[in-house]
Image: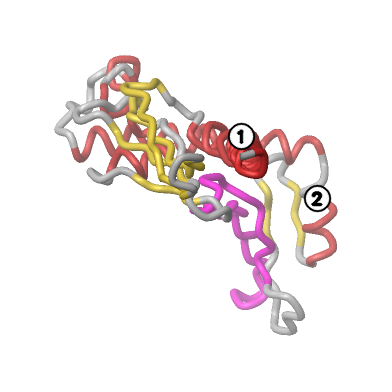
């Protein structure tokens, strides 16, 4: 057998990182309708080798692969965070990982994408509802990396005296949000906004009925 006839080693399959979901996901090595020469891949989950899209799609549905992918996502992130802290923050190579994980900076890196984005922006972040006048903002408390934030809601309130709608705001100081920003925001838009709209409608109808009586 000549050197050119030697069988090439399969390529190690690796998931890709999706910045939108902050997770590692499976992705087929070949684009749709790929017609070129395919190289064989080997998946680390159970050493399964594949060379077609069909083989890949069938493999990633298996329980053993799904479990491996979940562990890969967790373990890879842990390694990257620890390496980043060692490199960027001057940690000695021999510092135990347990100590690094207890550092404030490491805890900040374990926050979800929304929390990190708000914490990194001094002005906080404002989310507006599709309903005019309703909004909610999150602003990180200065110097805090634990998800501690000031949460402000903005909403219109019908004034029966003037017959106009005024925008009011309420702020809850130093609320521990952790990973609950999306949940808190969705609750405001999906639950509180309809309640506030109903209250405004009731005020308007009450003011209207009183005007008719007079």
Report the front residue among 60 and 105.
105
Q: Which residue is mark 1?
A: 199
Of all residues, the one furthest to the front in this rendering is 214
With respect to residue 207, does 92 lie above or below?
above
- Does any portion of residue 69 appear in the rendered image? no
Q: Which residue is mark 2?
A: 59
CB of mark 2 within 8 Å of CB of mark 1?
no
Report the front residue among 190 and 183.
190
Image point (33%, 29%), residue name: 150
Image point (62%, 78%), residue name: 4
* Secondary structure found at label 1: helix
- The residues bearing labels 2 and 1 have C-alpha atoms spaced at a distance of 54 Å
Which region shows up in magenta?
Answer: 2-30
Image point (59%, 39%), residue name: 207
With respect to residue 214, does 128 lie above or below?
below
- Left or right placement of residue 146 versus residue 62 in this view: left
User: For mark 2, does the 10 Å Cα neighbourhood hold few (<14), some (14 to 19), or many (20 or more) residues?
Assistant: some
Of all residues, the one furthest to the bottom in this rendering is 35
Rendering coords of residue 199 (x, y %): 61, 34
Is residue 189 a member of the stretch shown in magenta? no
């Amino acid at each position: 057998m000549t050197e050119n006839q030697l069988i090439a080693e399969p390529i190690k399959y690796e998931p890709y990182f999706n910045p939108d979901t902050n997770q590692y996901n499976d992705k087929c090595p070949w684009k749709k309708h790929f017609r070129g020469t395919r190289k064989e891949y080997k998946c680390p989950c159970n050493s399964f080798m594949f060379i077609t899209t069909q083989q890949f799609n069938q493999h990633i549905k298996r329980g053993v692969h799904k479990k491996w992918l979940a562990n890969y996502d967790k373990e890879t992130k842990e390694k990257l965070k620890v390496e980043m802290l060692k490199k960027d923050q001057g940690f000695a190579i021999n510092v135990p990982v347990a100590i690094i994980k207890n550092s404030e900076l490491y805890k900040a890196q374990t926050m979800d994408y929304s929390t990190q984005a708000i914490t990194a922006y001094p002005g906080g972040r404002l989310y507006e509802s599709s309903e005019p006048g309703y909004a909610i903002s999150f602003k990180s408390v200065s110097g805090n990396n634990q998800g501690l934030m000031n949460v402000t809601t903005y909403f219109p309130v019908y004034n029966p005296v003037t017959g106009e709608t005024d925008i009011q705001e309420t702020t809850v100081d130093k609320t521990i949000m952790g990973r609950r920003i999306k949940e808190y925001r969705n609750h405001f838009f999906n639950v509180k906004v309809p309640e506030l709209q109903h209250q405004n409608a009731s005020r308007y109808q009450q003011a209207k009925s009183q005007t008719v009586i007079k």
